[in-house]
Image: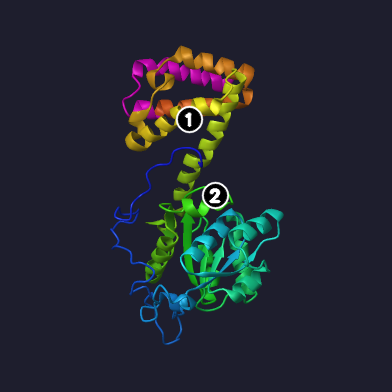
Amino acid sequence: MNASPHPEPPSADRPGPSSARSPEPPSAHSPGLRPEAPSDGGPGSRPEPPSAYRSEGVPDPSDRPARLTVGVVGAGRVGVALAAALRRAGHRPVAASGVSDASVRRAAELLPGVPLVAPAEVLARAELVLLTVPDDALPGLVEGLAETGAIRPGQLVVHTSGRYGTDVLAPALRAGALPLALHPVMTFTGTSVDVQRLAGCSFGITAPEELRLAAQALVIEMGGEPEWIDEAARPLYHAALALGANHLVTLVAQAMELLRTAGVEAPDRMLGPLLGAALDNALRSGDAALTGPVARGDAGTVAAHVTELRQHAPQAVAGYLAMARTTADRALAHGLLKPELAEDLLGVLSEGELR
């Protein structure tokens, strides 16, 4: 998604996915950022958040020592970029974990002077911990850190997974931590460009009610736009993003390969304006933006496409047929494809699927 045109980022005055519009989020230096929680230390009470998010202790912008110390577990592309963005906001990255050569290089470039240490040591040094590991590794990591006593009461534990909300952080919550799910909706390159591109980036946020202001403040400090996602909706939310972004890359890469096979010297230059216009129109008009032989019901053209793909790129046939059928179904449902033309078209697609 880096080179392709991006949709206009949502603005802070547009409501997110939650059913009610949230109030204008405060800045990180405004009063009122402390989550309300019992403070008597009795059973069921939540630990008090770090001082940077207490209403009576919110520092003046120049009072840097009161800001949060930040640690990163998993110094991949996402973690180092977010830590660098938090550093720009006045927080202080103090430790990161990462073992690959790429992690070492990224940390040196984006977090100069920040030592690479073991995950447990990252948690020992940081008030705000970013868990930026692959989705499938997150549950085991959280359980392991909690079981070994690495997580301490009052620590902000933040993961960046799109798939999970805060339920996956339940072991950390039981250890007294403050759980947040902050998912940046963009692709990362692992370079300093990422920090700049966070400006206007949507973040899918899931957080306990008493931590909503803290979550909003962190996202805004990084330049992002908060979008609230219910816990139960996280898998669907993530599936939608993967369908739109990850599969788009596959489709574009396949299209460029086919154009090269057809003799086009600069397929990226040819596709750029076409794909940019298609994306803009789709974001603006939805299914009404559908064009091409499937939406028109040109069964003969689609049959010719399938024949050529079988000859020159058989690995692309299944994807073409699947997307063509989905396109036909949506075009029919929205009145764009005439039923009398759809019959022949669907016949071509069915025949192609049987071969």
Q: Amino acid at mark 1?
A: Gly
- Visible in this render: residue 75? no
Residue 190 coordinates in the image, percent (x, y): 59, 51
Range of the magenta residues?
330-355
Mark 1 lies on a secondary structure that is helix
The earlier-in-sequence mark between 1 and 2 is: 2
Query: Is residue 269 depicted above or below 49 in this figure?
Result: above
Residue 19 coordinates in the image, percent (x, y): 30, 56
Q: What label does residue 188 carry, if any?
A: 2
Give the residue number, with chain letter if any, for mark 1. 272
Label 2 CA crowd tier, 10 Å (few <14, some 14–19, many 20+): many
Query: Is residue 328 depicted above or below 131 in this figure?
Result: above
**Is residue 314 found left or right of 331 in the rendered image?**
right
The count of marks equals 2
Residue at the limit of the structure toward the front, as seen here: 62
* Residue ID at (42%, 87%): 40
Q: Nearer the viewer, residue 303 or 5?
A: 5
Query: Is residue 175 depicted above or below 347 in this figure?
Result: below
Residue 1 coordinates in the image, percent (x, y): 50, 41
* Residue ID at (53%, 50%): 193
**Is residue 290 found left or right of 246 in the rendered image?**
left
Residue 150 coordinates in the image, percent (x, y): 62, 75
